[in-house]
Image (cartoon, rainbow, N blue to C red):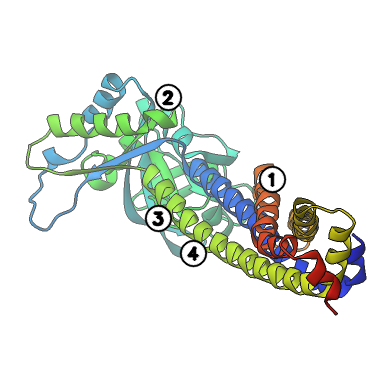
Amino acid sequence: MEALRANKVRAALTMLGVVIGSACIVTVVTVTLTGKRYIRRQIEAVGSNIVYASLAQSSSQTTALADQISMGDLEAVRRDVPEAIRVAGTNDVPMTVASSGKVWPVALIGVTQEFQQIRNLVISRGRYFDDSDFSTVSKVCLVSEHFAQTALPYGNPVGESIRVGELDLTVIGVFRERVETFGQSEIRTDSILVPFPLIKYYTGDAYIVTLYAQADTAEDVPEVTSEVAQILKSRHRPEVEYDVENLSSILDTSRRISLAMTIVLLLVALLALVISGIGIMNIMLVSVTERTHEIGIRKAIGARAREILYQFLLEAILISGIGALIGIGFAVAIPLAVVILARFLPIPPGLTISVSWLSVVLAFGVSCATGVLFGYLPAKTAARLQPVESLRYE
């Protein structure tokens, strides 16, 4: 400690690389875990454990009405796939709505009863469809929040009548997606939901464009995907292809991207630690040279080579250990700073940042190991000095 205090600036500059490296390790692990949790929550908010199927569109494939997914297929999935806790179907067509003296282009979507639960739709006003709406083919609809604000801006739209195509529909609710899909699903910015049987008035045939099946658990998703594909294949012509997919592929892609970024950033952190280790070794070699006379005196009064070795190793560990603690302190302070800045910056809702204590232990351990690894050569050099030559050294 006295040796480090005697050269405060040199010791601080030597620690700098360790501070940066250890802070990088903790920060990288924290960002990676936070990103994984956030992406998983976003995907689950779109719809947890979803399997979706549709007729494959191919220029070489001729399709007939019988090739389309039907309500019979939906009921077969509901009946024959016990791992599927909910099943729903949709059919969407572009349509126009006359309102407030203007014509608004909208996506008209026929949905079955469990669509709301599968897609986690939030009903901000009114209600969702009930059993009687489907059985009696009621001329009712739900409108998206954006459409309600722009096309129906006066008061509460629930109870109003709007003309969609050639039919007058009564608005019974206003909905929004829990997490925006930005038009990558059947729901667009301006969308209108109607009971599935009602879509036949617009398309002429009530077939399903997208079939959804929600697995009971994440582990059941691959099995449900396989079973849905088999059911569709067995109920239609062998040459007709169906796309049956799930959101696991998106999760796998996010994991691969996250892993690649983590590896790159950890390499940067390890590079910083290697550079700091070289700095520790250089400084310790200089220190051994400067303190050769001191080493000679200690050996002359009985200090063994092992004690000299431990002395210089301890100095290297102190430099790396103190630097690691400072770097970890900076890394741990980052989430606290983000929480404070969240009051002033547009940080996405649901983004929570927590520091993994495993990363803290890892950063401290790797930093101390760096000190031992790069401090061993100078320490061994000091331990091998001969007492007589050391005492004569000036």
Q: Earlier in the sequence, mark 2 or mark 4?
A: 4
- Kind of residue indicated by mark 1: Val
Q: Earlier in the sequence, mark 3 or mark 2?
A: 2
- Kind of residue indicated by mark 4: Gly
The local secondary structure at tag 4 comes to: loop
Mark number displayed over residue 361: 1
The local secondary structure at tag 3 comes to: loop
Q: In this rendered view, identify the residue nearer to me: 362 or 340.
A: 362
Distance in Å between CA atoms under marks 3 and 1: 42 Å
Distance in Å between CA atoms under marks 2 and 1: 57 Å
**Foreground disc of the pair 3, 4:** 3
Q: Are marks 3 and 1 in contact (CB under 8 Å)?
A: no
Q: In this rendered view, identify the residue nearer to me: 376 or 123.
A: 376
**Foreground disc of the pair 3, 1:** 1
Q: Is residue 16 left or right of residue 150?
A: right
Q: Are marks 4 and 1 in contact (CB under 8 Å)?
A: no
**Foreground disc of the pair 2, 4:** 2
Mark number displayed over residue 101: 4
